[in-house]
Image (cartoon, grey):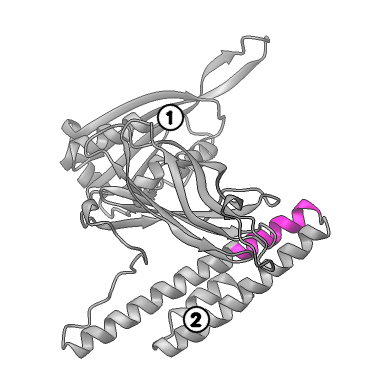
Amino acid sequence: MQNNELFFSNVEKVKDVNGIQQLVEVLHEEKVAAEEKLRKAQQENSDQQILDDILQEITQIVSKMKFVDDIGVNIAEKKDSAIRGEDNEPVKKKVKTKIDPSLGEGKHFKTSSDFVLTEWDDDFIIIGIKYIFEHYVLFQFHIFNMLDNQSIYEVVVEMDTSAKGFQIVHSDSCSEIHYGVYGQANTYVRLAESSSNVTGTLSCKMKYKIDDNDPDLDEYDEAEKYFDEFKFKDIEVTINDHLQEKYQRDCLTLWKKIGEKNEFKYFSTLSITTIGECMNQIINLMGMTLCEKSAKVNEEETIHTIYLGGIYRNGHDVLVQVQLKPGGRSAVLPTTTTTTTTTEMQLTIRSTDSSVAQVIGSAIKY
């Protein structure tokens, strides 16, 4: 397969539906070949690294298929707009899924990377994607059936949303998934309108009906058709899911304009000794981008201040000021006399929506 960056760049140059269809057919062939390679590797008891590499290849192919499909939707909508004589404005990528009317429209905010939720030797390979909207999260599950010569039916994914602030409002089931192919199931989770409980861990299990009847026999025994379930890895909803990068050219002016009334302060001591490491952890946690040329670090300075810019899923701007003071406090571990050097942190969050600053601040855990 070609380099991913080159692939996505080439797809965006495709201007007609026929070109998209050709790409879909090529990717389908690659997926079938990769699935066959995985089955053979399992039968030959290949080592885990080989199986993991093949699984990653399948994941990348599914990502490409999703991307190509989104481009196809854009082309079709632009063509339809031209036929109706409408302005040919850029069309945002659409999530190809049935949206339940009770969820309300809401804006599509961001899409997560694909993540694998099973082990290579499980009966099913499940790949998840999170679509974040203004008021809810769509969890999309691509389910590969690896049960030898068996099909599963009425497939649905159930999620435990006992974490306060989450509520399942709708699920899309998959009618059947045959051996060696994949199907798709969706679960829609509503987010609380105003709550600090926007993060949490959701346990998951897939429920399905399996048919153990031999298709080569004339007799059919209804008792051989029964319900079963399959538990897989938990899914984390983090503060990163609710934020996107937004570079603020005049960050300090906006910082002063928002003021202390829309502010949340947080103090912590981190068991990290260098400013660079602290910066990387905070950026990864928040999903925001550095502003005010604060990326440059002098490890010898006493205090380093960084500014992060972003946007919350409701469209309001978010700014974060982080002051880091390495070596500010020493801690003695309870089971030893060893002393560890730490970094003191003061994190201040401001937002054009005061409730957003409080929500983000309350959700942060180090």
Q: Is residue 322 left or right of residue 4?
A: left
Front-most of 344 and 296?
A: 344
Find the distance from the CA under tag 2 to the CA under tag 1. Answer: 41 Å
Residue 300 against residue 109 in the figure, above or below: above
- Whether residues under marks 2 and 1 lie with C-beta atoms below 8 angstroms apart, the answer is no
Q: List x then y, in percent, for residue 54.
A: 69, 62
Viewport quadrant of the N terminus: bottom right
Visible residue check, residue 54: yes
Q: Which residue is mark 1?
A: 365
Q: Is residue 267 magenta?
A: no
Task: State the SS at label 1.
Answer: loop
Q: List x then y, in percent, for residue 319.
A: 29, 43
Residue 265 against residue 222 in the figure, above or below: above
Visible residue check, residue 237: no
Q: Identify which residue is drawn at 46% across, 40% down.
A: 236
Q: Is residue 265 left or right of residue 231?
A: left
- The tag on residue 10 is 2
Front-most of 357 and 108?
A: 108
Secondary structure mostly seen in magenta is helix
What is the span of residues highlighted in magenta in the rendered image?
47-58
Q: Identify which residue is drawn at 43% across, 29% down.
A: 365
Q: Amino acid at mark 2?
A: Asn
Q: List x then y, in percent, for residue 55.
A: 65, 59
Q: Identify which residue is drawn at 36% across, 32% down.
A: 363
Residue 104 against residue 218 in the figure, above or below: above
